[in-house]
Image: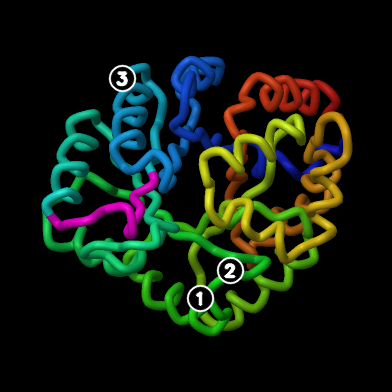
Amino acid sequence: MNISGSDVLLDGAVFEIIPMKNAFEKALDLPPGAIVSVTASPAKGMEATVELSEQLADRGYRVIPHLSARLTKTQAELEDNVRRLAGAGITRAFVVGGDAEDPGDFFDAMALITGLGRIEHPFTEIGVTGYPEGHPFIDDDLLVRALREKQPHASYIATQMCFDTDKIRDWLTRRRAEGIGLPVIVGIPGAIDTMKLMTIGARIGVGTSLKFLAKNRRSVAKLIKPGHYTPDELIDDLAPMAEDPKMSIVGLHIFTFNQVEGTLEWLEEARRAAP
């Protein structure tokens, strides 16, 4: 892989961890001070996200917990979660709508952001989601409207996992033309064993991170090949976009699916290969 022009992508990497069995131990393979994004899933609930975030923050990681609107049932629950995260010294959050079928007080991400506005919170940065390949259940027009509504309250956009740089470019170009100026962190898969990815996704219900596969056969084809997937080609294609200041791409959101060791090995090899 040619890393030239990709430093901004790799240096701004965020590593996503799923709060499941052995997640804490696997996350400890990350270098000290790494940025760790802790997901929220219907199978585990917000308690697992908050607990793992506390543990990782205690080890010195820069933690970005996902705050899921549809998994947070009441304003009181939100306040309790925020209090715990503040106590752990966490100053960043990533607000998502979530996939729970029975929401409580917060139907979507904007509703939860509004709930945060009612209380004191420690978050100096709030991230929101972008969907280069669309959402399986929400029309594109509604996604754009929601993103425009969230923009004044957000610090950046992190996109859902995508293998298609043309779609990323088209999506981002349209958003810039529509006045969405937030910096973007591009979501990509890490170096992963493809069968393990499918097993994990089916077991814990990671939501739209995998649901998009149902709409995109090219992505499915990349994932069902035997062996390991590595994002070398994807990063090569993203590099020119990262060099364009109008795009304002500031890093990568790497979906590790808890295969941290393999992703780090790939990252080290990629950097050694840099010219």
The boundaries of the magenta stretch are 66-75
The numbered dot on residue 58 is 3
Q: Secondary structure at mark 3?
A: helix
Q: Position of residue 117 (x, y in %)?
A: 18, 62
Task: Point out the tag, 2 or 3, that comes first from the N-terminus.
Answer: 3
Dot in front, 2 or 3 = 2
Location of the N terminus (image quadrant): top right
User: What predominant SS class does the magenta segment belong to?
Assistant: loop
Do the CB atoms of the residues marked 2 and 1 lie less than 8 Å apart?
Answer: yes
Q: Circle 1 sits on which residue?
A: 143
Vertical placement of 212 versus 204: above or below? below
Say what amino acid the circle numbered 3 marks.
Answer: Asp
Do the CB atoms of the residues marked 3 and 1 lie less than 8 Å apart?
Answer: no
Q: Quadrant of residue 112?
A: bottom left
Say what amino acid the circle numbered 2 marks.
Answer: His
Question: For mark 1, does the 10 Å Cα neighbourhood hold few (<14), some (14 to 19), or many (20 or more) residues?
Answer: some
Q: CA distance from mark 2 to mark 1?
A: 8 Å
Residue drawn at x 48%, y 23% is 23
Q: Position of residue 60 (x, y in %)?
A: 37, 20
Q: Is residue 168 left or right of residue 93?
A: right
